[in-house]
Structure formats: C-alpha cells, structure tokens
Image: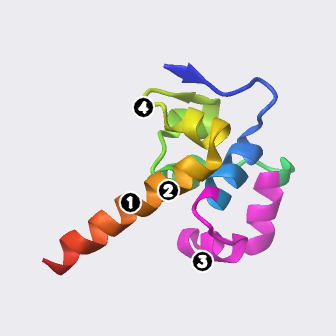
C-alpha cells in the first residue's frame, strides 16, 4: 500500500485526478449531479464531499477510494498520478480506448 504525501489534501487529490482525466469542473459536476461551485469547494478544502460522491469520483477516475479519501492506494495508481501525471493520463487513454474498442466489438 502506498501513501500520498502528507501535505496533499482530499481536495488536491480530487483536482489532480480530475485534471489527469482532462475533465473540467463542470464535467465532473454534471457527472456527479452537483454544482460546479461544489466541486470548487471540495478542491479548495472549504467542504468535504459526501461518501457517495467520493465513491462515484473514485470509480470515474479509476482510483481506489482509499487513495482519494485517505491518500492510500493499494493498486499504486495514486503514486502514478502524483509522480508522473503524464504517464497516468497516457495509461487512462489506453484503458479508455480499450473499453471503447470492447464496446464496439
């Protein structure tokens, strides 16, 4: 199990994962059924997301809920997001393309 740097907050992890997916705040807000202002409040640490929203974000971003909420990740994706965002984006594109290709077959 890996840990995020102690200084990285939940909001920073949400923002990093969202940006790694090239997703805007408005896109994430629409996906979760919340306002863009709510996403901004989460990312800046003014408020914390509810557990249901955390689960939906973890699923959408393809990261463990433990990494998103606590900074721990049993699969190591959190390290990839933190240490090499470009590699994470590339990996997510590969996964997305594979899923899309699978849907077409």
Cα separation between marks 4 and 3: 27 Å
In the displayed structure, 15 sits above or below 7; it is below
Q: Are marks 4 and 3 in contact (CB under 8 Å)?
A: no
Looking at the picture, how far across and down is residue 25, in whole percent? 71, 70
Cα separation between marks 2 and 3: 24 Å
Q: Do the residues labelled 1 and 4 touch (CB within 8 Å)?
A: no
Cα separation between marks 1 and 2: 6 Å
Residue holding disc 3: 30
Q: Is mark 3 on a helix, strand or loop?
A: helix
Cα separation between marks 2 and 4: 17 Å
Magenta highlight range: 20-43
Tell me what residue is drawn at x 76 percent, y 54 percent.
42
Tell me what residue is drawn at x 59 percent, y 40 percent.
68
Q: What element carries label 2?
A: helix
Residue holding disc 1: 94
Residue holding disc 2: 90
Cα separation between marks 3 and 1: 24 Å
Q: Are marks 2 and 4 in contact (CB under 8 Å)?
A: no
Count of residue discs = 4
Q: Residue 64 carries which label?
A: none
In the displayed structure, 22 sits above or below 4; it is below
Q: Which one is in front in this view, the residue at disc 2 or the one at disc 3?
A: 2
Q: Depth check: give the residue in front, 42 or 94.
A: 94
Q: Earlier in the sequence, mark 2 or mark 4?
A: 4
Q: Do the residues labelled 1 and 2 touch (CB within 8 Å)?
A: yes
Q: Which mark is residue 75?
A: 4
Looking at the picture, how far across and down is residue 22, in whole percent? 62, 67
Looking at the picture, how far across and down is residue 100, in whole percent? 29, 73
């Amino acid at each position: 199990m890996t840990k995020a740097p102690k200084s990285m907050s939940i909001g920073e992890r949400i923002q990093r994962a969202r940006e790694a997916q090239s997703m805007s705040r408005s896109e994430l807000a629409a996906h979760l059924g919340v306002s863009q202002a709510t996403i901004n409040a989460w990312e800046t640490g003014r408020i914390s997301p509810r557990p249901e929203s955390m689960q939906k974000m973890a699923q959408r971003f393809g990261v463990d809920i433990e990494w998103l909420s606590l900074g721990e990740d049993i699969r190591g994706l959190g390290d990839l997001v933190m240490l090499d965002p470009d590699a994470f984006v590339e990996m997510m594109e590969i996964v997305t393309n594979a899923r899309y290709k699978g849907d077409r077959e």
